[in-house]
Image (cartoon, rainbow, N blue to C red):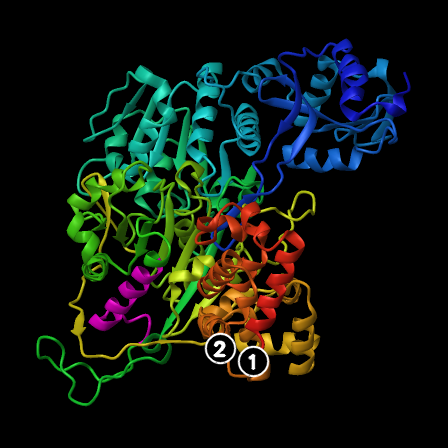
Amino acid sequence: MNKKDLSEADIKEKFITPAVTKAGWDEQTQLGREIFFTDGRIYVKGKMTARGKRKFADYILFYKPNVPIAIIEAKDNNHSVKAGIQQALGYSNTLDIPFVFSSNGDGFYFHDKTVTSGNIETELSNDEFPSPEQLWEKYKKYKGIEDKEVESVISTDYFSDGSGRSPRYYQQIAINRTIEAVAKKQGRILLVMATGTGKTYTAFQIIYRLWKSGAKKRILFLADRTSLIDQTARGDFRHFKDAMTIIKHKQIDTAYNVYLALYQGLSDSKTDDAYKQFSPEFFDLIVVDECHRGSAKEDSKWREILDYFKTATHLGMTATPKETNETSNIEYFGEPVYTYSLRQGIDDGFLAPYKVIKVTLDIDAEGWRPPKDFLDKYGNPVEDRIYNRTDFDKNIVVDERRELVAKKITEFLKGNDRFAKTIVFCIDIEHAEGMRTALANANADLVAQNNKYVMQITGDNEEGKRELDSFINPSERYPVIATTSKLMTTGVDAQTCKLIVLDSNIGSPTEFKQIIGRGTRINEEYGKTYFTIMDFRNVTNLFADPNFDGDPVMIKDVTEDDDISGTDDETTDEPIVDVVDGGDVEFPPEYPTVTGGGFIVAEPNPREKIRVNGVEVRIVNERVQYLGADGRIITESLKDYTKKNVIEKYATLETFLNSWKNADKKKAIVEALEQQGIFFEALKEEIGRDFDPFDLICHVAFEAKPLTRKERANNVKKRNYFTKYGEKAQSVIKSLLDKYADDDLLTIESLDVLKLDPLNKLGSPLEIINAFGGKENYIQALKELENELYKVA
């Protein structure tokens, strides 16, 4: 047997696995082979999505389940023993694993991250692979685990319900690091995990392991919204069974181990604080969900609860740590023990990517000044000043503005999916109420079928709040559109939300990221793989914040005449490169007021809004933003950008016409232009969807009059050139002309068109081709047809 002839799989089976098991590693419980630890990023191309490649490790060695300590990258024997070490080091950094090995079957190359002096890398024979105990001792020293009590806590098993579910790699890191910090008596701990990455499941596993190990006997899970507590209790925390209770109506029972509570259920400035019914030493651990909010403020009532239970370990969990002059999570909890960002979640394929549509209204951009002696809807004079974006729907209500916003939302949904779950974020409760009316009128046909098609879901609206569970339940069709102010900005697990509308003046990056988090969940079973943000208030300018860590896959500005119903179809056909292996991705053809156990928002001392109508409101801004071929955002006029790029390749119209005429397949020219950065779908949106790529280029780059596909097809039919063919072949050419008029030239260039309507009604692809005397003759006939189509050019 020659090792050089063996595959990598053979090398693993015959040499690496035997060496590892000989060292004492249990193949069933400690040896993980070909472990995928990401899902593969979701790439978006028009409405199509495709998964990139998943990352996987050849071997991960676990001292105990979910406690990984070593990684091995295998290569075949045509590589050196150290050939896989850099790849393995990259994976080890991601997975937080200190012992890194590479092997080609001859032995092992060992990189030891725990070494602080001497050789950090050594070569080992197959007989020298370290045992579990050897690496565990080094691991404990590396992690500062100095006594048996601490070791007992960090080696306590995870919860398993027998379903095979286990933490994702980043949850595993977050849990293990937190357990280590608690075991080492760290008093305050911060975990930062992007919305949609399973903070509650992570919290459950942390609490379960600390409780089972005896390190923490009484635990309080604190949140500030009823929906968060209810979701938590019904979700993973249900496994605590009789050991868990929810504190309601300030009724305290000290017989439980795990307590779920609202801040406002424990504290009330009007009555005695219920939390004081517990002794200050009652709780060992307090987990603060969404700790970026009130708990971080020194003078908040909520902070008093944490100060009262100061002997407990305080664990803060958030997607958006808040750092302002008045509030600091890090000042209170310390630096995060682990951070898993929005960008990481999207790259790993655990979170959905998103597109952005920016809609600019003229009165927002330019402001609106009432004409002299202008009266509001009630006959009162309107103060003479310039009203701008921050005024609309807060100080002054312009009926026409709300109607136009509702019209554009409806236009988008009609062009994509009218039953796509949609959240419309508004200025306040009154605005949410008004937008519900405007959207109901814009979608009267569907509201007539079911009046829950659009609903106001705000803290003061009991009927709407009752429908919140139905909105976030993927199997429930209604409500489809939810208008809200603050209630749904956080803690709402809307797995199938495909459209987020921003019509609120959001200046806080923290709140912006929380709102984006409503759309980042993935639910492939229900077709949710990406989502769209429609921005009416320039909120997405917050992408420019240097701390923002998740970029959109597309940004598009629209004008008054732009039909956004087809925005989701836009694609450039430019190859998309996978972040894992560099290969091309293949596609298939603010004012919180606490009340009564809920959380509502109201303005302090709200004043009556001015209500006006009769104001002309238009959409402005003719500039388009796209990600160009070089990865940069294009911000110039789409026509100017296209002309510049075309002329770089074809200096004159004659040059372009000659290239087009002589091309065996016009698709090759279109693809070459797309690779150069020409956005044909966007041009169709701006100039007209009835023109094919040829006419778009002639018109935009060389100012020639364009003909629609239908006009070109009719010109060919008038010339009747195809009478030289047999009867069946003539029928095929006429059907190809109809298909071209309906779809595009690129459709008829593919042989697949023979399987599509109306061609498939004329016979099988083979029968159609035989009508021309074979494939060569069919292709020649197609070229003649193309020449006829562009004859008048």
Task: Say which residue label 1 marks.
Answer: 792
Question: At 27% from the left edge and 63% from the top edge, which residue is drawn?
Answer: 406
The answer to whether the residue labelled 1 contacts the one labelled 2, judged by CB atoms less than 8 Å apart, is yes
Q: Which is more N-terminal, label 2 or label 1?
A: 2
Q: Amino acid at mark 2?
A: Leu
Magenta segment, which residues?
A: 388-412
> Looking at the image, is mark 1 or mark 2 nearer the viewer?
1
Q: What residue is at 85 percent from the left and 16 percent from the top? A: 126
Instruction: Please state if 206 lies on the left or on the right of 674 as rendered.
Output: left
Q: Is residue 393 magenta?
A: yes
Res 750 visible: yes
Which residue in the structure is indicated by mark 2? 707
Q: What kind of residue is marked 1?
A: Val
The CA distance from mark 1 to mark 2 is: 10 Å
In the image shown, does 607 or 43 lie closer to the viewer? 43
Q: Closer to the camera, 768 or 125?
A: 768
Left or right of residue 132: residue 639: left
Helix, strand or loop status at disc 2: loop
- Residue 672: x %, y % from top left: 67, 64
On-image quarter of the C terminus: bottom right
In percent of width and height, residue 631 lies at 62, 61
Q: In the image as oriented, which residue stretches furthest toward the left?
A: 379
Q: Is residue 116 magenta?
A: no
Badge 2 crowding class, 10 Å Cα cut-off, few under 14, some 14 to 19, many 20 or more, is some
Please determine whether, in this image, residue 377 is positioned above or below residue 532.
below
